[in-house]
Image: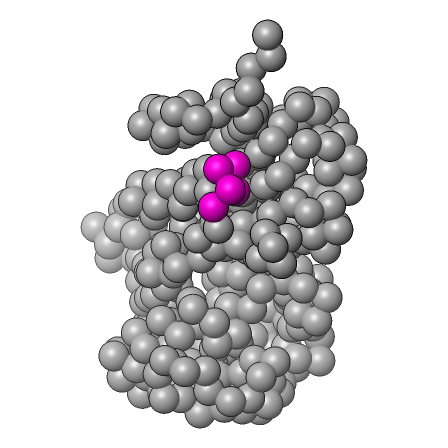
Amino acid sequence: MTNEKPLACICLPLEPELEARIEASCRLEHISWAASLDVLVEAVRDADGLLIGNRLPIGEEVFAAAPKLRVLAGVGVGYDAFDVAAATKRGIAVSNTPDVLTHAVADLVLGLLFAVSRSLLENAEYVRSGGWSHAARPPRLGFDVRGRTLGVVGMGRIGRVVTARAQALGMRTLWNDVFSELPAGAPQSDYRELTELLRESDVVSLHTDLNPTSHQLISADELACMQPHAVLINTSRGPVVDQTALVEALEAGRLAACALDVLEQEPPAADDPILALPNALLVPHIGSATEQTRYAMRELAVRNLLAVLSGEPPPTCLNPEVLD
Ligand code: 8YV
């Protein structure tokens, strides 16, 4: 006798209570979170649902191998790893996890801002290595963020929260997006064309999603617009910045510093020149990496998965047209 329950393939570790929620109405199969695309393709052949992060590109190759697939529940707000158009053609619902990570990413942006503005890593190393005890020359002085101008590129959920928080710190804020009308609910902020925003800002923070329009949005020409004392913060996606051009600008002193949570290649090759730059503060894609936020992302992804498999509308669907 065949088991009627749908098969949910889970490609990252879940808490027992989340697994129990899935198992109440589905069969559950684990796929290693480190699986290659080839292994994943083999593993999803009978899947009705797939819950997965954004490490692997999920498109036609996976969809063609999984004819029963009804839902791709992503764990992450960015969905550039998913071919939503191909999923839509096949009637597969695709979901992401917006909102639940907005504040965690904004926290990291402020953390990076202060780490750079107060030379926190250099100062910590100065103390640890005995420099302070031996009255060695201290690291350079920092800069006040109050009164400085922050340019936010991408006025979505995260860009808005970063703008509001920067204003609370006494920063002046500018914004740019593909639209030029301030979205409803956004804090009051001044719109600028991208090049103007780059010219006027002391700190630029990137919050666009990655799509063909935003790919290498910040290239050599854009970096040339920035002031030599300016700082670039990227917590969006690595390919939004032309990293070769960024390294050149940092090496030449045409840009003071960058703080990157995301890189063109993750993890970077050991000889990636960005790793050698003292004025590049790099962290390993940790925008959402808090216990609470990561749990909230997984929990929302489980709700999306179960909703589709039980014929309900998922809370955060990227292609709701497939539900009709
Ligand atoms: C990752 C992210 O999802 O939400 C996003 O788009 O980039 C991150 O939160 C996270 O690193 C897990 O893959």
Q: Where residue 62 sits in the image (x, y, percent)?
A: 73, 35
Residue 49 is left or right of residue 38, and the answer is left
The x and y percentages for residue 52 are 55, 37
Magenta-drawn stretch contains 309? yes
Q: Quadrant of residue 99?
A: bottom left
Please identify the quadrant where the C terminus is shown: bottom right
Residue ID at (72%, 66%): 212
| Residue in view at x 47 percent, y 72 percent | 156
Tally the numbered discs.
0
| Residue placed most toward the observer, 49 or 261 | 49
**Frontmost residue, 85 versus 213:** 85
Q: Magenta segment, which residues?
A: 308-312
Q: Is residue 323 above or below residue 185?
A: above
Q: Is residue 270 visible?
A: no
* Along the line of sight, the residue nearer the viewer: 115 or 67: 67
183 lies above or below 265: below
Whether residue 14 is in magenta: the answer is no
Which scheme is used to colour this image of the protein? one colour
Position of 61 compared to 157: left or right? right
Asked whether the viewer can see residue 49, the reply is: yes
The secondary structure making up most of the magenta span is loop
**214 sits left or right of 10 in the view:** right
| Residue depicted at x 47% and y 55% | 316
Q: Left or right: 263 with respect to 167?
A: right
Instruction: Tell me what residue is drawn at x 53 percent, y 54 percent.
Output: 317
Find the residue positioned furthest to the top.
1
